[in-house]
């Protein structure tokens, strides 16, 4: 693998090639770099050594032995994909097993139980998110625990973690926490924290709800500590049984709003909160997002390629696809061919949009799994991989991709774990092994884009990455939690591009709204853009 650098403002290509732009070429488009901020571009081409054929297995499953809590189906499934030791490879963190699976860079992983702190009740970890909250350039971890008080673990820079919860200002409330998400909600340059809490439900025949555990919001003070500002959130969403919270600028006013995804939607449906001068207020027009579901997993991607995020909410029996038709979102589940069971329903947990076949459009992976409850559901439930074809239509091809597990998987994070440019899937289970599905790469094109900028939000959480080719555009966003289920992935964008050998431009919109554009970029490579 070779690596080279270029500076935005000229085309980026292999050394010795002509980087001039031919104005007579009407088949390509460029974005005017005058309005952009400077950045250094590091390019790392990657070649697929043995491209898969259509009849071969699409994934290689690498299982990680799991110590499943025998009594609980609502914890023990947190997973994060993050480069804990900053060696350039994505590691897999499983707090409930007190293990980091260290990526060796050759498709193998070494379990290391000495990197994570010894924490009481860690086997009840329900989620974990990685983010650089203190701005020192490494990834720290926020660990959600089921009823035992959450934890903040600080990375020492070498991939070992210290529990700093007691001095951080983050409350150790013994709540049923199911997720968390990081973003610079107040625009001061550092990452703030939303904590999603669920709650107890008395099952049938009594069937009594709540009250649910209130969600939490923490303001980063910039010195390694946080202030609890949960009173800045509207009261109504805090009455819901929350699994996820996504930070995004829904109203286009250049601050981050919050979409709260709730279980037991008949109690409180999903809710959109607008950021109004630091107060998260309930949007008067919910824009079609206030769906009432038993919401769990949350996939986010630009399915219809309009540069606005679309959502799939995995739930009990009836997962729902919400496509943007600006300024609203509408239910397109049936219209695109996603099938929900009407009898003996599957229960949807982790879900993720990614271009699994790298043909240029978004596919959808959904994990299903048994829940030991008074509501009937099958003990064996197959997962689904909805592959997108023409006109947004999706077909479940899980069996053809050898995705035949029925071991009650929960957590799902999709990322390019083995650095071949194709999406892999780290998963957790409450009945079987945890593990990672490593993709077997093909000859189709792709780009992997990671970002870096000065300041405490080093990895540009909430940035937007757009790639343009011949008038078409692909859009991805940089997240830190709030997507998938039970964890977080690395801060990077992975875009499948079919048979495109060169894109016209890559455009980055940084968290502060400034942009960087690089023109004429070869595909099948990893691109690291560092803001100057």
Image (tube, helix red, strand yellow):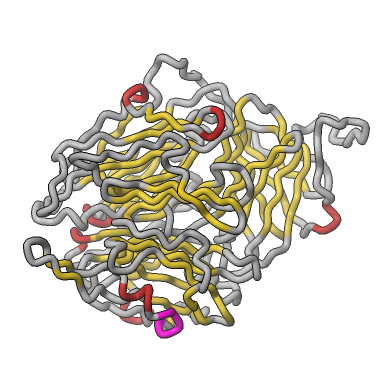
Task: Please tell me whether residue 88 is drawn above or below residue 117 in the rendered image.
Answer: above
Query: Residue 74, how many percent across, how many down?
Result: 20, 57
**Left or right of 167 on screen, residue 526:** right
- Residue beneath the point at 12% across and 51% down: 372
Residue 192 part of the magenta-drawn span = no
Work out whether residue 52 can be spotted. Answer: yes
Q: Which residues are magenta?
A: 230-234
Q: In which quadrant is the N terminus drawn?
A: top right
Q: Is residue 504 left or right of residue 406?
A: right
**Spot occupied by residue 127 in the image (x, y as percentages of width and height):** 31, 59
Closest to the observer, 521 or 249: 249
Q: Is residue 377 above or below residue 166?
A: above
Q: Nearer the viewer, residue 117 or 212?
A: 212
Query: Which quadrant would residue 111 be assigned to in this image?
Result: top left
Does the stretch in magenta take in 231? yes
Position of 286 relative to 424 (above/below): below
Give the left or right position of residue 207, taking residue 321 as reference.
left
- Residue placed most toward the observer, 71 or 416: 71
């Amino acid at each position: 693998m070779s690596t080279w650098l270029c500076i935005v403002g000229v085309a980026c290509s292999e050394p010795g090639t002509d980087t001039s732009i031919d104005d007579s070429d009407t088949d390509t488009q460029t974005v005017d770099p005058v309005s952009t901020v400077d950045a250094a571009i590091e390019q790392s081409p990657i070649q697929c050594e043995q491209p898969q054929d259509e009849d071969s297995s699409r994934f290689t499953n690498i299982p990680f032995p799991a110590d499943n809590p025998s009594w609980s189906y609502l914890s023990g499934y947190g997973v994060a994909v993050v480069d804990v030791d900053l060696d350039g490879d994505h590691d897999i963190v499983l707090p409930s097993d007190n293990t980091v699976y260290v990526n060796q860079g050759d498709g193998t992983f070494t379990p290391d139980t000495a990197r994570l702190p010894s924490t009481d009740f860690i086997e009840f970890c329900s989620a974990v998110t990685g983010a650089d909250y203190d701005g020192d350039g490494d990834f720290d971890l926020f660990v959600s625990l089921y009823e035992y008080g959450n934890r903040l673990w600080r990375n020492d820079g070498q991939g070992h973690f210290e529990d700093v919860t007691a001095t951080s200002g983050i409350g150790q409330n013994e709540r049923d926490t199911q997720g968390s998400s990081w973003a610079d909600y107040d625009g001061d340059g550092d990452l703030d924290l939303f904590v999603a809490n669920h709650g107890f439900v008395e099952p049938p025949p009594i069937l009594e709800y709540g009250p649910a555990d209130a969600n939490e919001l923490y303001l980063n003070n910039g010195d390694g500590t946080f202030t609890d500002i949960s009173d800045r959130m509207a009261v109504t969403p805090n009455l819901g049984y929350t699994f996820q919270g996504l930070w995004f600028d829904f109203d286009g006013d250049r601050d981050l709003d919050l979409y709260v995804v709730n279980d037991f939607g008949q109690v409180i449906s999903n809710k959109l909160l607008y950021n109004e001068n630091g107060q998260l207020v309930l949007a008067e027009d919910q824009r079609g997002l206030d769906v009432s579901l038993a919401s769990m997993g949350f996939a986010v991607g630009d399915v219809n390629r309009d540069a606005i995020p679309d959502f799939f909410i995995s739930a009990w029996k009836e997962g729902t696809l919400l496509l943007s038709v600006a300024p609203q979102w509408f239910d397109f589940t049936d219209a695109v061919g996603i099938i929900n069971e009407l009898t003996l329903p599957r229960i949807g947990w982790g879900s993720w949009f990614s271009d699994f076949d790298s043909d240029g459009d978004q596919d959808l992976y959904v994990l299903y799994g048994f829940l030991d409850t008074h509501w009937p559901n099958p003990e064996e439930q197959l997962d689904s991989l909805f592959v997108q074809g023409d006109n947004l239509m999706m077909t479940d091809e899980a069996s053809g991709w050898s995705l035949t597990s029925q071991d009650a998987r929960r957590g799902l994070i999709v990322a390019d774990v083995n650095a071949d440019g194709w999406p892999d899937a780290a998963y957790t289970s409450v009945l079987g092994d945890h593990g990672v599905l490593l993709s077997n790469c093909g000859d189709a094109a792709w780009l992997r884009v990671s970002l870096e900028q000065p300041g405490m939000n080093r990895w540009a959480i909430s940035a937007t990455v757009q790639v343009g080719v011949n008038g078409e555009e692909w859009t991805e966003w940089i997240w830190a939690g709030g997507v998938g289920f039970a964890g977080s992935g690395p801060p990077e964008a992975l875009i499948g591009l079919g048979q495109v050998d060169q894109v016209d431009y890559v455009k980055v919109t940084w968290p502060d709204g400034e942009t960087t554009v690089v023109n004429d970029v070869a595909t099948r490579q990893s691109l690291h853009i560092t803001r100057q």
